[in-house]
Image: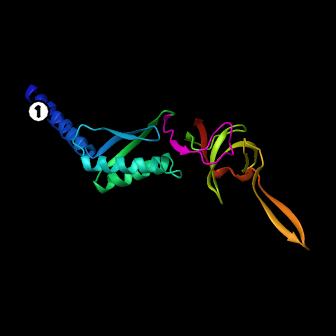
Amino acid sequence: MKLKTGLIIGLLVLVALAGSSIYVLSNQHSIGITITTNGTDVSIAKSSWFNVPESMIGEMKVKALADVQDADSNVGSIKADMQNIASKYNYTVQVKISSQFGEDQLPLIATVKGTSMVPTLTDGQEIVVLKTADFKVGDIVVAHHPDYNLIVKRVGEINGSQVYLKSDNQAIEVIQNQVSYVNGMKQIVTIQKTPLNTWLPKSNVIGVVKEY
């Protein structure tokens, strides 16, 4: 009886060990990675008991940096890119993104061009944007504009799916005076540049300026 019991216990132990081996083997190509970024630099930390191809991590780092610096990227697209790279190496990855704003919060570094946000922001000033669709009246945001690409403005009003963006600098800039003659009489036409205040779809807003 004792021998039979011992055999049963031995078999159960073997089954357990076999199950553990199968589990370990099936999961050695499944790893977790954490992408840490401040919007300028990127580092990748991996969590795995097994050796992971350094070429895969290197490729992920290059792509992650390009994604972070892309105004149109988001947390979901970066995670998808990391998974696509891992799949080429027969791996699966669980991705976390960490930044100065928290987990899965994506920063973007941008440079102000022009004087439309003077005195708050000046031409050539570097700003740090948190990519988010959560903004309110009074926030300074970066948004896509159909004619001027990326613009930085203050939220003046939100109406349904539209947002009104306005310049802090409301001064009218005189570009030039044009002289013309009509019926022999001299006329001076002043060309002025007014601040860009515009309605845009809320979906055009990339994020909120957090550091400047």
* Percent of width and height locating residue 54: 25, 46
The answer to whether 32 appears left or right of 204 in the picture is: left
| Residue found farthest to the top | 2
The part of the chain drawn in magenta is 102-123
**Image quadrant assignment for residue 34:** top left
Which residue appears at 42% of the width and 39% of the height?
A: 96
Farthest bottom residue?
Answer: 183
| Residue 99, x across and y down, in percent | 46, 35
Residue 130 magenta? no
Query: x, y percentage for residue 137?
Result: 73, 39
Colour logic: rainbow
Nearest the viewer among 199 and 170 is 170
Q: In this view, does 188 lie above or below 5?
A: below
Please state if 152 lies on the left or on the right of 199 as rendered: left
What secondary structure is found at the residue carrying circle 1?
helix
Residue 35 position by quadrant? top left
Q: Is the magenta stretch mostly helix, strand or loop?
A: loop
Membership of 107 in magenta stretch: yes
Looking at the picture, tell me which residue is in the foreground, 116 or 54: 116
Q: Along the line of sight, which residue is nearer the eye, 145 or 161?
A: 145
Classify the position of the N terminus by image quarter.
top left
- The quarter of the picture where residue 190 lies is bottom right
Q: Mark 1 points at which residue?
A: 7
Q: 113 or 130: nearer the eye?
A: 113
Few, some or many residues within 10 Å of mark 1 (<14, 14–19, 20+): few
- Image quarter of the C terminus: top right
> Residue 118 at x, y = what percent?
68, 40
Residue type marked 1: Leu
Q: What residue is rendered at 13% in x and 32% in y? A: 10
Q: Taking 75 as reference, is 184 left or right?
A: right
